[in-house]
Image (cartoon, grey):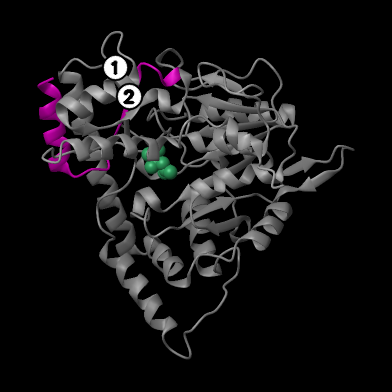
Amino acid sequence: MIKINENYLKLKAGYLFPEISRRVNAFVAENPQAKVIRLGIGDVTRPLTPAITAAFQKGVEEMATDSGFRGYGPEQGYAFLREAIAINDFQSRGAEITADEIFISDGSKCDTGNIQEIFGLDNKIAITDPVYPVYVDTNVMAGRTGQADAKGQYGGLVYMPCTPENDFMPELPSQPVDIIYLCYPNNPTGAVATKAALQKWVEYARANKALILFDAAYEAFISNPDIPHSIYEIPGAKEVAIEFRSFSKNAGFTGTRCAFTVVPEELKAWTASGEAVSVKNIWNRRHCTKFNGVSYPVQAAAAAVYSEQGRQEVRGLVDFYMNNARTIREGLSKLGYKVYGGVDAPYIWLATPEGMGSWEFFDLLLNKANVVGTPGAGFGASGEGFFRLSAFGSYENVCQALERIAKI
Ligand code: MLT
């Protein structure tokens, strides 16, 4: 008899974004004339830029020649991309990350979901609340949690509320934890982490032999020069942190797929008998067994992000989306909404009108304004009473969404 992994049965409903699509599709089926504006999932809308497209095409053409054809590439990624990343994203900011600490992948969703596999099931996991659902769901699937309670919180996880009162930066946990997921600039709240705040977490992790899983997928959207782009800008972080980065949101790779994870040489985890083990070696072992690398043309396209032209074009994309973010933030504020984020991050987090649940507000916006956002409760119990709008739409749609919201 086939036995299922019953941990999967603990998962609540569907994964958040397919669940939203399901509701939107049902609405569209009943209201085919409605012109729905989608500011829900953080999916980019601007096309790939010329420098990136040219490198992508050149990569494809090379593959069609005898001399340029490539079969399996290195599982960790091509050296040309790993080196460009190490120099441009880290060394230029004083973070001593080298190419061999970088693992190219097909996405931060996969990496943040897969990473937990190499750590013991008895680790105590701390997550911020609200949170990107992948961190929670993958720990549920692995069997690190009990059942969900009425609020949707799983037994065994340590939830760290992020609210306007603490500027969406959680307090240090009051009970011992081993693995801490942090995401800054934050999805979903759009908050950022100062150097001092990250320093506090790095010190906590060092003192407690804990690990920080730092999701920096939105670092390109930081405009404040005092906000760190990488956790490795904090002294001592290489001993306690793994960082996740992506080309999805800055360079428009949500459909093209390329990302990377940094696992520093210094990072250690321990066996039950207290023996130190290199996390990088274990992640490399897992990566080589389960992954065969990102295609050559895609890595060539990603490397073009670091060319002079590519850099300017990507800046243009980021500026475009951040102009949307500003428009949403200012527009909603004028309408009397309390809004957060949207300054150093492409998400706007708004408090729903007095007493309204976040799914209730989702339905109101969908039905009355034909605008799709993401209910805060979908990101965790502390997201109840909040709602997320993404800045990744077109400018016209953003303006029209605001006009329609003004009318309800
Ligand atoms: C989001 O909307 O939170 C993101 O698009 C999800 C993701 O990047 O997987």
Q: Amino acid at mark 1?
A: Thr
Q: Is residue 154 left or right of residue 85?
A: right
Q: Give the residues in magenta.
A: 382-408
Q: Amino acid at mark 2?
A: Phe
Q: Residues within 10 Å of mark 2 (few under 14, many from 20)?
A: many
Is residue 119 visible from the viewing direction of this image?
Answer: yes
Residue 33 to residue 357: above or below? below
Q: Quarter of the image for the C terminus: give it.
A: top left
Residue 385 is inside the magenta segment: yes
Q: Residue at x 50, y 48 (%)?
A: 108
Q: Is residue 159 left or right of residue 88?
A: right
Q: Which disc number belongs to residue 371?
A: none
Is residue 139 visible from the viewing direction of this image?
Answer: no
Gap between marks 2 and 1, in whole Å?
6 Å
Q: Quadrant of ligand 1?
A: top left
Extreme residue toward the top, this view:
355
Residue 187 to residue 359: above or below? below
Pick whichever, 271 or 184, lies toward us.
271
Q: Residue at x 83, y 41 (%)?
A: 271
Give the percent coordinates (x, y) of residue 200: 59, 25
Residue 13 is inside the magenta segment: no
Give the percent coordinates (x, y) of residue 191: 40, 28
Q: Residue at x 58, y 29 (%)?
A: 199
So how many labels did they put on this image?
2
Tell me the residue that label 1 is attached to.
352
Give the percent coordinates (x, y) of residue 323: 21, 39
Residues at discs 2 and 1 in contact (Cβ within 8 Å): yes
Q: Is residue 316 left or right of residue 250?
A: left
Give the mark, 2 or 1, whose residue is nearer the N terminus: 1
Tell me the residue that label 2 is attached to.
387
